[in-house]
Every structure is written in structure tokens, then in C-alpha cells.
Image: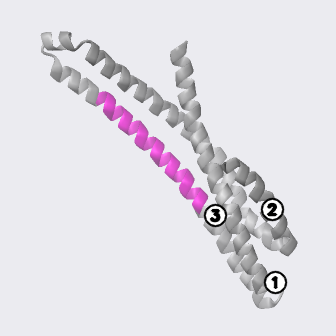
Amino acid sequence: MYVTGTLVLLPLALVAMTRLSVPVSLAALAPLVLIGLVVRLLAPGIMRRSRAVQDRIGDLSARAQESFAGARVVRAYASEDVEIASFADENQRLVTETLGLARHRAWMQGLVALLGGLANLVVLVYGGSLVISGDLGFGDLTAFMMYVSMLIWPMISVGWVVSALQRAAAAIQRTRRLSR
């Protein structure tokens, strides 16, 4: 759904913007192009961290399964405290990996939102100066603000989709490793 919306909105907004003013369009696109760079730089880290989270979930699940399967042996040797401590350690590793993934995703999403806001600011400042000088109409500036908003959402959704695809790819890789 996001990809389809992006493929439709992006070209339409770009054409409409360039028909109004090429210089303002280029100024607005400069921060938006950086969104692709941010996603390209941060997406591999999300993939790596997603894989680590999936691995920790697998480790924790295996630990729980072993504990449940060997419950009689654990009780017979009175090693419940050892099992609880071991499970707590596995769980803490999962929490640490999950927090690392959340921080990395937050950086990516925050930078994408910041760059989208910067694009709006550029249009407002540069377009506003053109309105004051009479080189751009107020209605055109208003339209630009709307078009930039139309471009920001697809760019943000691309960031979210890339993040979700990275998590899904990590889960698929783990599933393939387990099925071998």
C-alpha cells in the first residue's frame, strides 16, 4: 500500500511542483533527497539488529522449552534458582538487543521526519522571499507547501517500509537457518 501510494504521489507532486517553479522545486527536493541517503545508511544496521533480536528470541524460546521439558530433572536436583537465573540472563540479552534496535529505528525515523520538516522550512523561507519580491504568487507558495507535504509522507513511509522489510528479512533468514 505504501509503495503504491509513493509510486503515484511522488511523480504527480514532482510534476506539479516543477510546473509552478523549478528553483523552488529543486530547493525543496534537496532535503528530501537526503532521506534516501539516511535510509541507505541506517537500513543495514536495522537488518543486523533485527537479526540479533530474532536470534535472542530463538535462544530464549529454546531455553524455555528446555526448562519445561526437563522440569522433573530440575526439581529432582533442586536447581530451580540456576534455571531462573539462566532464563533471566537470556531475557536480559533480548531486552538489550531490542532496545538497540528501537534506538536505531528511532534515529532513522527521527532523521527522516527532520529532513521532511527541513524541506517545508526551505519552501517557506525561499518561496516566501519569492512571494515578497513578486516572483511567485501566494497561491503558488501555498500549493508548494501542499506538494511538499504530499512528498514527505511517501518518503517517511518508504523509511518505515524499509525498516519493516529489514525486520522481516531477518526473521526469514532465521527461519531458513532453523529449517536446515
Tell me how far mark 3 sits from mark 2, CA to CA: 18 Å
Colour scheme: one colour
Residue in the picture at 45% in, 33% down: 53
Amino acid at dot 1: Leu
Q: Earlier in the sequence, mark 3 or mark 1?
A: 3
Residue in the picture at 57% in, 27% down: 172
Of badges 1 and 2, nearer the viewer stands: 2
Amino acid at dot 2: Leu
Predominant secondary structure, magenta span: helix
**Residue contact between numbered discs 1 and 2, judged by CB atoms under 8 Å:** no
The residue singled out by tag 3 in the image is 116
Up/down of 126 relative to 39, above or below:
below
**Residue 50 picture location, percent across and down:** 51, 35
Q: Is residue 102 visible?
A: yes
Residue in the picture at 42% in, 39% down: 98
Q: Earlier in the sequence, mark 1 or mark 2?
A: 2
The residue singled out by tag 2 in the image is 12
Q: Is residue 77 visible?
A: no
Up/down of 91 relative to 70, above or below:
below
Quarter assignment of residue 26? bottom right
The answer to whether 82 appears left or right of 166 in the picture is: left
The answer to whether 60 appears left or right of 24 in the picture is: left
The answer to whether 135 appears left or right of 89 in the picture is: right
Tell me how far mark 1 sits from mark 2, CA to CA: 21 Å
The residue singled out by tag 1 in the image is 136
Residue in the picture at 41% in, 28% down: 56
